[in-house]
Image (spheres, helix red, strand yellow):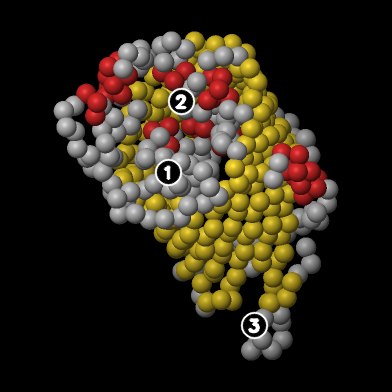
Amino acid sequence: MNNKTLMVFTGWALLGGALPVMAQDECEVPDCPGFALSANYAGDVRNNMTGGIKTGTAYSQLLTLGLDWSSDSLFSDARVTGSASVIYMGGDAISGDYVGDLQGINNIEADAAWRLYEVWTEFAFGGNTTTLRAGVLDLNAEFDAPETLGLFVGSPHGIGTELSQTGSAGPSVWPITGLGIRAAGAWENGLSWRLGVYDGAPGSADGTGFSDLHVSSDEGALVIGELAYSSDRFNKISFGAWSYSAKFDRIDADLMANPLPQSGNQGFYALIDMSLGEIGDTALDGALRVGNAKAQFNPVDHYVGAALTASNFWAGRPDDALGFAVAYAHMGDEYRATQAFAGASTTSAEVAYELVYSTNLTDRLAIKPGVQFVQHPGADASIENAWILGLRFEIVREHSWRLSARRGDEADDSYARSTP
């Protein structure tokens, strides 16, 4: 599908009335039995005004098409839900072609392709407090998933840099996902837990193709666990730990005589995201995230991210939000030694700053103008600090069909389509 065809399809599906406006019920799929369709198009234009590799403008795009369903009738005392989605992304690379940063200026920047994103089935037991999910999964949809940090467009605010860099081609996260299984549960006191096992090397070796679902004992698995807490005061407090079962070459193998692959590629992260109170009607929230990865296998050994957001500036626009965030990626000694051996001069860290404003122009259209500053892009001493001006817009269409049990004969447990 070429870009012209894609844009025509997107305009028809998202703006042209392909689906009626979704009804706002008290209970929606997947919380109620039924199914839902969704389409989301995001466009992002960024201009590197000064510094970096070179100045210039990049446009990238992401189309996501999804189907979700839920049923209470397949098994007694258990809810079954499922999800399937595909994505198309493409366009220019603001980080790769212009800025040269390592953390990611634009979280939808990717090589042009159609990809299978997620396909999974989930079983919920015990009053829906314990769930088991399996299929093609995005680890970041549940682990290291942000609350306040979700406002920002920089990649490290969606998943910490120290975790996103790991593995032979990255963990099972957008845009390249793989097979996985996840168990989760919650208690009434606000505590929840989740444990997942994912393909240790998702995707094909060259990173191309619609999907490449395989498992290999040599590539191993990524095991991750997280304990989280939420309340009226705390949006989220979480601690997670992860580890690869496979062995990896050391990042400084070129400096060693006859090095052998080693195990121990592992790390942890911690997040505190909380309400900071109000100034008048304006709500303030803040988040702090830290993470660690083994320096002998990964360029970044420590990561710190922080953010402050303000929302509900006036009653007429409660969803508008203003945010400022910082992402600090510290480079490990082994990586810096390898770069020095190759004749490259590195800095101790890359630091990215982001100021963004988000507003919904309509029920279907939201925009995010913002400015970013990257200090020491790529931790490369030869690249100048960069200023980037950007605009993100998102168009969303959703519709759901609820199913409700027919009343009458107790033996008749069939379902009828309800009116949206």
Most foreground residue, 365 or 188 = 365
* Residue type at tag 3: Asp
Q: CA distance from mark 1 to mark 3?
A: 49 Å
Name the mark nearer the viewer: 2 or 1.
1
The numbered mark, 2 or 1, whose residue comes first in the sequence reads 2
Position of the C terminus by quadrant: bottom right
Q: What residue sits 59% from the left and 42% below the top? A: 113
Name the mark nearer the viewer: 1 or 3.
1
Q: Position of residue 350 (x, y in %)?
A: 43, 20
In this rendering, position of residue 306 left or right of residue 260: right
Q: Position of residue 32 (x, y in %)?
A: 64, 65
Q: Position of residue 252 (x, y in %)?
A: 26, 27
The mark found on residue 332 in the picture is none
Cβ–Cβ below 8 Å for labels 1 and 3? no
Q: What residue sits 54% from the left and 29% below the top? A: 154
In this rendering, position of residue 285 left or right of residue 338: right
Q: Residues within 10 Å of mark 2 (few under 14, many from 20)?
A: many
Name the mark nearer the viewer: 2 or 3.
2
Place residue 97 in its image quadrant: top right
Question: Dot 3 corresponds to which residue?
Answer: 413
Q: CA distance from mark 2 to mark 3?
A: 55 Å
* Residue type at tag 2: Leu
Q: Is residue 214 above or below residue 175?
A: below
Most foreground residue, 180 or 249 = 249
The numbered mark, 1 or 3, whose residue comes first in the sequence reads 1
- Asked whether residue 266 appears in the rendered view, the answer is yes
The mark found on residue 205 in the picture is 1
Secondary structure of the residue carrying tag 1 is loop
Q: What residue sits 64% from the left and 47% below the top? A: 64
Question: Dot 2 corresponds to which residue?
Answer: 102
Most foreground residue, 397 or 130 = 397
